[in-house]
Image (spheres, helix red, strand yellow):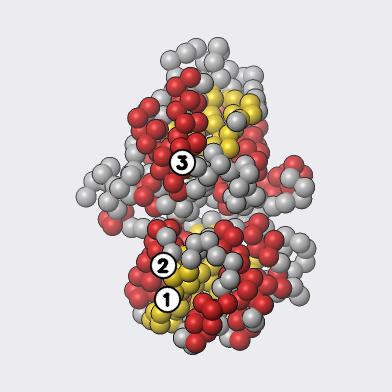
Amino acid sequence: MFRNLSMLLLCGGIASGASAAETPLKIGVLTDMSGVYADAAGQGSVTAAEFAIADYASKLGLKVEVVSADHQNKADVGAATARRWYDTEGVQAIFDVTTSSVALAVNQIAREKRRAHINSGAATADLTGAQCSPYTVHWTYDTYSQASGTAAAVTRQGGDSWFFLTADYAFGHAMEREARERVLKEGGRVLGAVRTPFPTADYSSFLLQAQGSRSKVIGFANAGGDAANAVKQAGEFGVGRRGTKLAALLLFITEIRALGLEAAQGLLLTEAFYWDMNDGTRDFARRFAERHQGRMPTMIQAGVYASLVHYMKGVAATGSADAAEVVAWMKANPSEDALFGKGTIRQDGRAIHDMYLFEVKTPAESRSQWDLYKLQATIPGDAAFRPLEGSDCPLVTK
C-alpha cells in the first residue's frame, strides 16, 4: 500500500510530544501512483518531497522521514490511509493529495485529528471555501485560478467571445461557471456551451457545434484524458489553425508532451510553474529529470517541493509539529523558494503566488522535447485566486 522512503537527516529533529533527538518529523505523500494523475503527481511528487528535505532539512536542524501511498483516486482509500497514518504511524502532515474527492475526504480526517494537510494536487476551491480548516493549506492551483485566470487573460488579449465544451459533472460545471463569470466581467460574451459525457472519447459533434458558434475561443472545461482527447481531436480537425483559439482550463505539461506539438500547438493554458522560467526552476528540473527518465516536473510536483519547504520552516521556527501552530506560522510569514518565488498564505489557507498564461509552441518553435511553452501573460497572485472578500470560509474575518 505504501513504501517507506526514509530520508533521515541526522542533525537533530522535531516531533510533536517527543524528544527531537528520538523521533524524526514524519510526513506522508498521498498521491495517485497508478491512475490518470500518476504522471502529473505520483512518484514524481515523492521525489519532489525528497529534494525539499535534502535541500532544507539539514539547514533547518530537522530530521525528516517520508512515507508514501497510492490513494487510487478513491476517497475511501485516501481517508483510510490518512486515518492510519495520523493514528498509528506518527505522520504529522500529508502532502500532495490529487483528486478533489480524495482531498476533501482527507481534509475532514485532518480536521478531526488536528493534523496538517498541505495540498498541492487537488483542484477543488472548497478546500479554502466552505470546507476550509485551520490545519489545511492549498498551495498550487484551484478551479478558480485555472478557469478565471485563463478566461481573464485570454479575454483581455482579444479573445472576447467564448464557447465551452464542459464535462457533465460537478468539476466541469464549476470550471465553466468560474470562466463564464470572468469572461463576462472582462466585457466578453459567451456564445454557448455544450455538456459532454464523462468520460468520453469522441468530441467530433461537440467541436462542430463549437465551430458553428463562430466564437473566437473554445474553452475546454474538463481535465485529464477528456481534455487531452478534446485537444487532440481539435488539432486533427484543424480548429486551432482556422483562427479560433483553444483554451484548456486544466492540463498539465506531461499531457501536452504526450499529445505532441503538432496536436497541441497554439493551445492556451494556465500553470503555476514551468521548468524553464529561470535559473532556479531549471536547476530543479535538471535534478528532477535525472531521477525520472528525462521528464520535467509538473506544477503539482513543484508545489509539493515548495509547500514542504515552507512547512519545514514553520516546524523549525515554532519548535513544534503541532498542526495549528505550524499552519498559523505559515500564514503569518511569507513564503519564498526557487520554484514559486515569493508568496503569502491567507486566512482561508489559500497560498497566493503568481500564475502564468502560456501558449503551446509550434513544432518549429521548439528546441527540445520539453521546450513546450511560451509565456503570454503573468497573472498576479491577488488576481489569480478568488478574492478573500468573496470567500465562504468560516475562518475569514469579514
Please name the residue shown 70% across and 70% down the image.
Answer: 261
Check disc 2 and give the amino acid type.
Glu
Vertical position of residue 362 compared to residue 336: above or below = below
The residue furthest left is 398
Q: Which residue is mark 3?
A: 75
Q: Which residue is mark 1?
A: 193
Vertical position of residue 332 compared to residue 81: above or below = below
Distance from the alpha carbon under mark 3 to that under mark 2: 24 Å
Given residues 86 and 150, the one toward you in this image is 86
Q: Position of residue 189 (x, y in %)?
A: 38, 81
Asked where in the image residue 104 lies, by quadrant, the reply is top left
> At numbered mark 2, what does the secondary structure look like: helix, strand or loop?
helix
Distance from the alpha carbon under mark 2 to that under mark 1: 9 Å
Please name the residue shown 44% across and 82% down the image.
Answer: 161
Q: Position of residue 353 (x, y in %)?
A: 47, 53
Given residues 265 and 58, the one toward you in this image is 265
Please name the residue shown 64% across and 29% down the image.
Answer: 3
Given residues 151 and 110, the one toward you in this image is 110
Q: Which residue is mark 2?
A: 176
Distance from the alpha carbon under mark 3 to that under mark 1: 30 Å
Given residues 191 and 127, the one toward you in this image is 191
Check disc 3 and give the amino acid type.
Ala
Vertical position of residue 66 compared to residue 373: above or below = above
**Nearer the N terminus, badge 3 or badge 2?**
3
Check disc 1 and give the amino acid type.
Ala
Q: Position of residue 50 (x, y in %)?
A: 64, 34
**Nearer the N terminus, badge 2 or badge 1?**
2
Disc 1 crowd rating (10 Å Cα; few below 14, some 14-19, many 20+) is many
> At numbered mark 3, what does the secondary structure look like: helix, strand or loop?
helix
